[in-house]
Amino acid sequence: MGEIEEVQFGDPLILAKFSIDELRSFYHEAKKHFGLRLAGLEGRSKSVSPEDEESDYLADRMEEVAGLLDLNEHFGVVGVYRTFESFLRNVVDHLGNEGFIEGETKKYLNGLMGQLREVGVDLKQPPFQWQEIEKLREIRNCIAHGDGWVDSQHVSELRDYILPVEEGQASLLRLPGGYFLEASALVASTCEFVIEKCAEARRGRR
């Protein structure tokens, strides 16, 4: 019986890993496609005189394609954060079905964290990288709710991920290339730690 329960409890991790793998695959394909497009435009622009009308056209096209590369990072971040919250909901559902947690499963991170603390799993304590998780959430919220703009309240927190801005002003989010891959690795490892800690808590209560 215990072995079957462990397999069932691992299902949220299997689903999360599948989702992360799909997001990474999409990310790499899009990055390759738009990277080749940008390189082609840059090569073409080198053979065009700055005074030529085509120069402005190529500059605009390069800016558009560079923007699509940025959007690829944004899409990945939103997707991997959604995967993370979905994973936590699935875990809490399993714990609730087994009688370890009471009440309806919460929808969002803060509520889910509170429910996991009921079984001794605290995302703010090691081995979890809470500061990075919180940063990921703030970046995701700027993309999902602010269309990529960082309001003045979060400028100091996300200073490494924005364009230069005057104090008290909002700024545009500018993620470094590859941030999504860092975020996906963070979520993958966090999900694994959650399963490990929950399994420990479940064994301790039997």
Image (tube, grey):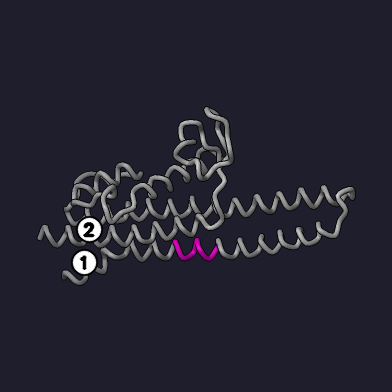
Determine whether, in the image, residue 177 is placed left or right of residue 82.
right
Q: Which residue in the protein does label 2 denote?
A: 198
Q: Residue at image x 85%, y 60%?
A: 47
Quadrant of the image for the N terminus? bottom left
Residues at circles 1 and 2 in contact by the CB criterion of under 8 Å? no
Question: Does the image show residue 144?
Answer: no
How far from the left and from the top, in percent, is residue 184? 44, 58
SS majority, magenta: helix
Q: Residue at image x 55%, y 62%?
A: 26
Q: Residue at image x 42%, y 60%?
A: 185
Q: Residue at image x 52%, y 43%?
A: 143
- The residue stretch that appears in magenta: 20-26
Q: Which residue in the protein does label 1 denote?
A: 5
N-term-proximal mark, 1 vs 2: 1
Element at label 2: helix
Q: As drawn, which residue projects farthest toward the right?
A: 52
Determine whether, in the image, residue 105 is placed left or right of residue 21.
left
Give yes or no for residue 140 being in the magenta stretch: no
How far from the left and from the top, in percent, is residue 150? 52, 37
Mark 1 residue type: Glu
Neighbour class for label 1 at 10 Å: few (<14), some, many (≥20)?
Answer: few
